[in-house]
Image (cartoon, coloured by chain):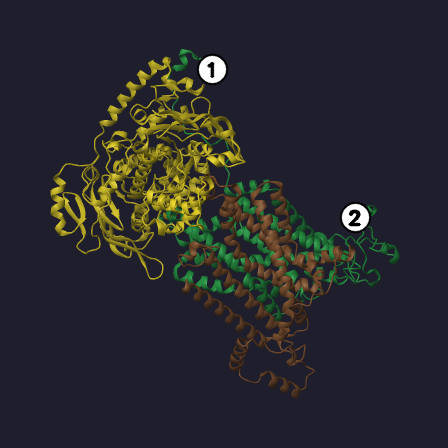
Amino acid sequence: MKKYIASRIGYMLFTFLIIVTFTFFLMQTLPGSPFNDERLSETQKEVLNERYGLNEPLSVQYFKYLGNITKGDFGVSFQFDGRSVSSIIGERIGVSAILGAQSLVVGMILGLFLGIIAALRHNTFIDYGAMVVAVLGLSIPNFVLAGLLQYWVGVRLGWLPVAFWEGFEYSILPTIALAAFVVATMARFMRTEMLDVLGNEYITTARAKGIKEHTVILKHGLRNAMIPIITILGPLTVSLMTGTLVVEKIFSVPGLGEQFVKSILTNDYPVIMGVTLFYSLLFIIVILIVDLLYGVIDPRIRLSGGGRREGK
Amino acid sequence: MMGKILSVDDLHISFDTYDGEVRAVRGVTFDLYKGETLAVVGESGSGKSVMSKSIMGLIPKPSGRIVNGTITYQDRDITKMSNKEIRGLRGSEISIIFQDPMSSLNPTMTINNQILEGILAHQKITRKEAEKKVISLLELVGISNASERVKQYPHQFSGGMQQRVVIAMALACNPAILIADEPTTALDVTVQAQVLELLKDIQKKMDTSIIFITHDLGVVANIADRVAVMYAGKVVEIGRTDEVFYNPQHPYTKGLLAAMPDLTIDQEELQTIPGSPPNLLYPPPGDAFALRNEQALKIDFLHEPPMFKVSETHSAATWLLHEKASKVTKLLEEKQQLEKAISDQVPKKEIGKEKILEVKDLKQHFKGGKNSVIKAVDGLSFDIYEGETFGLVGESGCGKSTTGRTLVRLYDATSGEVFFKGVDIHKKNALNLNKDIQMIFQDPYSSLNPRWTVADIIAEGMDIHGLYTSKANRMEKVYELLKTVGLAEEHANRYPHEFSGGQRQRIGIARALAVDPKFIIADEPISALDVSIQAQITNLLKKLQKEKNLTYLFIAHDLSMVKYISDRVGVMYQGKLVEVAASDELYDNPLHPYTKSLLSAIPVPDPEVEKKRIRIPKGKWTIDSEEYKLREITEGHWVACTEDEVDSYRTKSDAPAVLV
Amino acid sequence: MKVNEYELTDDLFEESGKAFEEKRITSRPSSTFMKDSWLRLRKNKGAFTGLILIILIMFLAAFGPYMNSHGFDEQDLTRTNLPPKVPVLENLSFLGVSGVDIRGTDQYAAKEVPDYYWFGTDDLGRDLWTRIWQGTRISLYIAFLAATLDLVIGVAYGSISAYYGGRIDNVMQRIIEVLMGIPNLIVVILLILILKPGIMSITLAMVITGWVSMARIVRGQVLKLKGQEFVLASRTLGAKDKNLIWGHLIPNSLGPIIITTMFTIPTAIFTEAFLSFIGLGLQPPIASLGMIVNDGFKMLKIYPHMLMFSSVIISLIMISFNLLGDGLRDSFDPKMKK
């Protein structure tokens, strides 16, 4: 087991190194950065180059970059003169984290519920209804949903604020827009897993023991169906990250996503790279946690010390 | 006989499927008495499993439903009970054991918790007391170190041990009735023998009534007091075990018994039942078996036969027992005797002296997990003579299938030599080898490409080797092969999913024959088939051998079929051959302790023999030393042993046979 | 003796003399695997609806822009921000296609425009009907191109990895594992930053990480098939690698491959729209569906029609591909869920 954890962490570091290297060399090739702006005079350029260490050989720059990143230093923003990227991330991440966590929790609970009742009422109208919701949630792009919510609930009905972040009611529409995908993914996944598990012979065996039906469903069915749910945490994290970019922009939520989109529009490369690296790190950590959790929860893996089941 | 404990009366169960209503059980009636074992025998799809599940109210809903009939237990009709009432019975009064122990156990729950919940559901005792009971139950079913193992998860137990756990779970509340649904089918013979003994032992101790569902007549003879034979959703014959085995009345029972090879005598050809069971989507009128019964009476096609009493305890549903049929029965008996006399006269076949295959110290090792090596085949040496059938037997994991696959070079051997007609196959042009040596596979469902037509499947080898002159010639050859294996021309354009298991196996045989091979490796070719179909395929293989002078390597775990079809047999254990001898010699006079224990574990479809059976436990012997290899004890009888042991085996081999 | 109601005459108790006949199966027309799947798909209402919608949308994307006389880039500042107006349907006011905007003024009358703009016009006076179908065409083009590239790379990579196994498989799997650890959105954004946004660069950026899921599915499928007895049988008959891969392995993996592609297409459409939305989309004058949606947001509160039509169409595309994918999964292989 220890060996397994060590190898997973090794993978994680290696992947991150690749991403860091990739972003570093990207920075070098980027066109249109403020450093080679035509309006700058030669001396101004030199001062900038001096200040950002751009005169040194590439390899030195690379290792300096690596060193800085391990210290949590992602460089300095072009846009906000002199502000460090990490401080920008630090300032902005709180709002995005609240929004993300809120959507994840709401979405997972609703999705679980929908998925389970769909499986238990397989091939009834409840099942079909839940699956229609799931297909819609999966298909309607988050910006479309956000736009619709903003227009109908916010503008036409005027029930909820349509922009900014000044209290709980401001978070409701963005949360719904983000949670829809989570609900849909979760409901579909839970339904299939649950149907799969309920078809197993050990469920029949449990029934044959004469224990109550809800005990059979909860103790034998749900528990086994829940194990693979962990694996969709990875894709869900990605969808929330992408989602926050769009939803924060639409609802003018002052989160990291909104900043990221702004930075893209203003070619603020240090911030783009910094946020990119931050997102990658977050994703890699989630994947690692998923891998490790899977081993802990499933005794078949915990006790044989192997990795995740093949194909999952 | 003691009191009735359960009676099933005119039970009908149907399933609603995509294609329509499948009438899985069509009027089953029987009684179960206290303390007895009633075996329910039948082929797949005969409705035996569905029937047994209905006793516990476990028919999958909403697709399945009980259409008609009653199941009376303690004066109450189970079919009319509420869910809550049935729950009260399940596990406490009636318990069930399923075929595959691995899937019957919840993989993420400890053994303790799984047994515990059953006890706590029905008995008002504290958790502590219940936990003690779990441990004593595990000890009862023969799990050593129970207090430790109870904390473990199912995957930490071997298959046999898992089945013991399942049995312990079923016995938790001392049920009056235990339903065992093919409980030993997934197990090896030696493990099967242990589980059967355990069940008998428990029955004696607890006076449980057992309904034992199986397709294996040997197991029935071993364990049952009474037998019910099911066919197409009906009980066609029921009676005491000796009555049904020695005096079968229904043509299906007769056919089934005759299709089993008899270990005690030599037979040239097995009697077979043609065709396969009817589709219960459209159950035939009259006697459902009439379509496959060449001696069927006219009435069999018109009216369903009622149960006729043969004796107080024995009855069968066949018009042959009607008083008006007495003339015909006499006629039929005479006919059968005549046929038997003819078939007994067939001369023994001649086997050539020419070695067709020589295997020398063959090893096949696979990489296991980290740095471990699995020695699947570990130093095999044997010869196969032209025209003979060499049987290779052993339990699962002994390396017999790997041997077969290495011989056709599906795997490259780790070391050792294989000579085919004197030429080393590792050097020989692979294309030619693929024409001379062919293989027949086990699983009729996965051995044919579902996207290809039967003609393309059969012609694949001819396509590869260019064995035809024109398209018409190709089809001609395909038609001829279809005829050879007992199929019709119009089958050529069909796809595999349209065929039954037995027919698919015939297609597989035709594919192998297409390249005109000399030597065929048959890897468990009949073990996935029903008894009546097994005999058809075995006969086909024998017929082809005679017609085409083929040599077979017949790999199987079913020792009775191996004995029947093989001239010589090799017994494998942990990648090594432990004994090789002519098949009669091996069965009459086994020498190696492993062979002895294996043979003593196979149940034979003969209740008299089964009553006298003494199982010999697996002995201990050294296997790893260099000295330990196959040595000839008497002419043609080889046993793996050390130099010192040879003499002791020689003296023993003079002694008369102990077994069978 | 009488049993039940019928009479048992003596002649019934004679041998029937019928010899056993192997059941002929000619009664049913022969069906191939594909035909079976098609029949099952036809019965799946959701999937069939999806299929029809896709065909309809593809038809409109191909011919829609030519259905009226307006060019997709024809600007006319005298007729900007017109709400939709459709002949005949304009008389049914609740449909909202009568040329009246949300404040209740008939813009067509106010601006004295005699033409009909079925989806209205945008802030530059361009016909939205033409632009939307033009955009759909480009979005679908990008999606199909990306899906095809994913398919080719994924099938090749996955089948090679699984078929040859051993060390080759090991190395190839490690590469995939690293790629899986990188959030693909990040790669796409970074790549678009260096390559200028354009149809090719957007497609490429999506393919760079997109093929991985196809490769994994094909690998899993081939690994499973490789051990099947019909493949072993083919090998004992002396079949070459080429025969095995093209005759046995790929045809039997077709189901999962098609299904995966059906799910790649909506993902690609979404990614493209998403990129447009965060400012990394195609450059004008080319417009994709995502760009039009993005433009629509600018004047959402006053001229909602600009957003409505484009978002409904992009949602419909996503829904219909998802429905079709689900249906195909059920009809090809009921066991391959998730």
Residue B339 image point, x, y percent: 27, 23
Letter of the chain that mark 1 sits on in the rendering: C
Asked where in the image residue A279 lies, by quadrant, the reply is: bottom right
Letter of the chain that mark 2 sits on in the rendering: C
- Which chain can be seen in brown? A
The tint chain B carries is yellow
The tint chain C carries is green
Residue C334 image point, x, y percent: 52, 44
Identify which residue, C76 or B399, lies in the foreground.
Answer: B399
Quadrant location, the N terminus of chain B: top left
Mark toward the viewer: 1 or 2? 1
SS of the residue at dot 2?
helix
Side (left or right) of B452 relative to B649: right
Whole-angstrom CA distance, mark 1 to mark 2, is 70 Å
On screen, B438 above or below C180?
above
Q: What residue occupies the far bottom of the structure in this picture?
A: A43
Q: Is residue A148 visible?
A: yes
Identify which residue, B614 or C79, lies in the foreground.
Answer: B614
Side (left or right) of B70 relative to C97: left
Q: Which residue is mark 1?
A: C4
Q: Which residue is mark 2?
A: C95
SS of the residue at dot 1?
loop
Residue B337 image point, x, y percent: 26, 21
> Mark 2: few, some, or many residues within 10 Å (few <14, many ≥20)?
few
